[in-house]
Amino acid sequence: MYPYQITSEEQYTNDYRNSVENPEKFWADIAQYFSWKKTWDKVLSADFEKAEVKWFAGAKLNITENCLDRHIEKLASQPAIIWEPNDPNEHYRVLTYKELLFKVKQFANVLKNNGVKKGDRVCIYMGMIPELAIAVLACARIGAIHSVIFGGFSARSIADRLQDADARFIVTCDGAFRGAKDIPLKAIIDDALESCPFVQRVIVCTRTHTPVSMIKGRDVWWEDEIKIVETQGNPDCIAEVMDAEDVLFILYTSGSTGKPKGVVHSVAGYMVWTNYTFVNVFQYTPGQIYFCTADIGWITGHSYLLYGPLSAGATTMMFEGIPTFPDAGRFWDITQKHKVDILYTAPTAIRSLMAYGTSYLEGKDLSSLKVLGTVGEPINEEAWYWYYENVGKSKCPIVDTWWQTETGGIMISNLAGVTPHKPTYATLPMPGVLPCLVDETGNELADNGVSGNLCIKQAWPGMIRTTYGDHERCRQTYFSTYKNMYFTGDGCLRDKDGNYRITGRVDDVLNVSGHRIGTAEVENAINMHQGVVESAVVGFPHDIKGQGIYAFVIFNGMHVDEEHTRKDVIQTVSRIIGAIAKPDKIQFVSGLPKTRSGKIMRRILRKIAEGELNNLGDTTTLLDPGIVEEIKSGRL
C-alpha cells in the first residue's frame, strides 16, 4: 500500500473534492513522499491565457533517484524490469533495482564520455530491449533531454525531429526484431543523417548483428564504450540536480499541421503525476508483476512502462515483440510464464486477437491476472466484453484510461476495483482533473446527459509545458480555442451519472491503432508523389485499428493503372512518414469538394468514407456540387 492510495469510493469522492478545491495543499501532501534535494517555494502557478504553468517551483530533484536510488535499501534484489524477447526461444532477462541502477550509471558515464551535457538533446531510436530503458534513464540521470522516436518511423520523419530538437547525439541499435521482421535501425539513421550534418555522435547497441556502416569519428559501439567505462573503474555517476521545471523529455506527436510538434514535459510534476496515477488507477500492490505492452517510443511507454512503475518501486515488464508472433497466444504465454498481475494494452491489440478466436486462450493459466487495462483510444463494447470474459474470466476490473501525450498521464479512468467500470466509458476524472464539456461557441454544458468538446479547466501536475522551440504553437493549439481552458481536441459524452465517454477527435487528427496521425502530415506525404496534384485524407471506422486512413487523390495522368499507382503512393507515405501512416484506402478522383474560397469540405469526404452517402448535408455552397456525386459513385 502507498500512503496516497485510494481504497474506497468514499475516499475517491473526498480526495477528488479536496484536489479541485485546494490543489496546492493536495499535491503538496502527495509530493512529500518523494525524494527532493530542496523542497518547493510554491506548489502551483498557472496562466492558461499565456499557456504558462509551473509546479513545485524552486524545488530541486533528480527523477532517477526517485525511480532507482531510493528503492535500493529495501528493493535491491527485486526485479525492476523483466524483459521478454521477440523470439520465445531466446531467454528472458531480469534486471533487479540494483542491477538497473548500476547499468544506468554506467551508460550515463558513457554519455558523458561522448560529450553529452545537461540540457543536450539525445535522440533514442532503438528496439524494445532493456538498453532502451537504460538509455532513457541515463539521459535523465545527467540532465540530458531524451527524445525517443518509435522504431517504425522513416528516415525523413527522424530527420524532421532531429532538426527540430537540434539533437546532436543519437543512441540506436544495429537493428530490431519485431515479429517476423528485422528492422535495419542503423541504416535508417544513416539515411536520416544525410540531412542532419550537425549530429556529432551515434552510439550503436548490438541486437540483430545486421551488417552496418560505422563512420569514423561519428559512430561508436555501445559495448566498446561500456568497456571504456569499465577500464575507468566504473566510476559513480552522481545524479544531476535538476530544477522542478527543467525539461525531462521531448516527445513528438502529430498535429493538425504537417509539422510534428515536440511536446515538452518537465521533471517534478510529471514524476508526481505518473506515479500517483499508476498507483491509483491500477491499484498496484508492491510485489505485483505489471505488464504494459506499449513501445517506449510512445507516451504510454514513457509514463506507464518506465517512470510511473519504477518511481513506485514496481516490477515492470517489457516486451520486444508483437501480440501475434509466433502466434496469437503470445500475450497469454507471457502472462502465464511470469504470473502477470496487471495487463495494460491497446484496444487495437484486443480486436486483433479477437479475430483469432479463443482457441489461443485455451489451456493458458491466466489466474494470476487481477486488473486489465486499455489505452490509446476508446474501446468498443464487443472488444470490452471479449477482454473481460475471455482474458479476465469476468473477475478482473477493466480500467479504460483516457489521456494524451500532452497530459503526461491518465486523466479520466475508473480505479481498479474501487470505482465502478462501465463498458466503453473512461468513467470519472482523476483527482486534480477538472473536465468540462463545451459547445462550439465555448459555452459550458453543465448538465449530465450531454455531448460536447472536452476541455480541462484546472492545471494538473503532468500537463504539457510547451512545444519545443515554439511556445506560441502550444498556446494556439491547446489554450486559445476556449478561454482559460485546455482543449483536448476530443469529443465527449457525459452520461446521467457523470461518467465520461470519449467519442473521438474533433480536429484534423486521426487515431489509428491508438497513435495520433495528423491528416495534414499524411496529405503532405501523398502530395510528394510526382503524379499527385492534390489529396485529402479523412478517417473511417476500421474493425481492427479503430480508425483507418481514407485518401482521396487527384492524380495527374489520363490512363492510370490504379492498383499500381496505389502501391506507389503507399510506398511514398511509408518512405516519408513510416508504415504506420499508410492509407488503407486510396480513391482516385477528378476533383475535391471545395467551397468557393478553396477550402476542402472534409466533413463531406468523412461521411462518404464512412458510407453515409444519403446524409451529406448542404452541398449548394460548393464550387462544383457535381463532384460529390462522382466521389460517391467511386467510393471504395
Image (cartoon, rainbow, N blue to C red):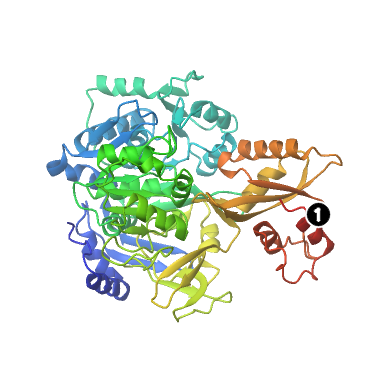
Residue at 52% of width from left, 39% of height from top? 162
Q: Nearer the viewer, residue 528 or 427?
A: 427
Nearer to us in this view, 120 or 542: 542
Q: Is residue 551 above or below residue 572?
A: below
The quadrant holding residue 402 is bottom left
Indicate left or right for 486 with 528 as reference: left
Question: Residue 392: horizontal and vertical position, in percent?
Answer: 32, 52
- Residue furthest to the bottom in view is 447
Judge whether 294 appears above or below 33 on screen. above
Mark 1: give few (<14), some (14-19) or many (20+) Cα within 10 Å: some
Quadrant for the N terminus, please: bottom left
Disc 1 secondary structure class: loop
Residue at the spot of label 1: 591
**Residue 531: horizontal and vertical position, in percent?**
78, 40
- Give the side of residue 632 with respect to residue 144, left or right: right
Task: Please identify the residue farthest to the left as the structure is shown.
Answer: 73
